[in-house]
Amino acid sequence: MPATPRPRRDALPRTLLQDTLLELYPSEALIRLAEGSGFVCRYRKLDPVAFFWAVTPEAGVYLQRSLDRLRHVYNQKAARPIHSYASFYDRFTPELVEFLHLCVAHGLS
């Protein structure tokens, strides 16, 4: 089962926003949404929870400007890192868009 996001060593103390997001998007809900969107078929290759927490706050709040930096953040959060650049880049698919769309809908409901 995918783990909850691990805090980075250089991370600031958790804020109310972060606590609220963790409550709003529990691991079980993210896994269900990832499976429902077709983003994840096997956990052996990708942790949808770690991917969500790497892409969402890093791209939105902290404004990481490269996919390589997002891959680095994912690798810090995931139990099984993705070492290949191509394997990480290949995750940006229509299924990821659907997964993120379902996550937004879940958050708004």
Image (spheres, helix red, strand yellow):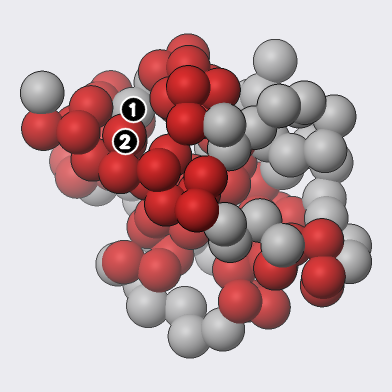
Q: Quadrant of residue 73?
A: bottom right
- Visible residue check, residue 88: yes
Identify the amino acid type marked 2.
Cys
Image-based side of 51 in relation to 65, left or right: right
Residue highlighted by disc 1: 25
Q: Are the residues flagged by discs 2 and 1 in contact, CB closer than 8 Å?
A: yes
Q: What whole-number distance in Å separates the C-alpha atoms at marks 2 and 1? A: 8 Å
Residue 17's x, y, as percent? Answer: 19, 45
Query: In the rendered image, is residue 7 in sight?
Result: no
Residue 78 higher or lower than 37, as above or below: below
- The residue closer to the viewer here, 79 or 39, is 39
Instruction: Identify residue for label 2.
Output: 103
In the rendered image, residue 74, in percent from the top left (x then y), is placed at 65, 55
The residue located at (42%, 52%) in the rendering is: 97
Q: Which SS class for mark 2?
A: helix
Mark 1, secondary structure of its residue: loop
Toward which corner of the image does residue 19 lie, by quadrant? top left
In primary-sequence order, the first of circles 2 and 1 is 1
Q: Quadrant of the C terminus?
A: top left
**Residue drawn at the location 30% of the way across and 43% of the way down:** 101
Would residue 91 be found to the left or right of residue 19 on screen? right
Q: Front-most of 96 and 18?
A: 96
Q: Say left or right for 99 vs 67.
A: left
Badge 1 amino acid: Tyr
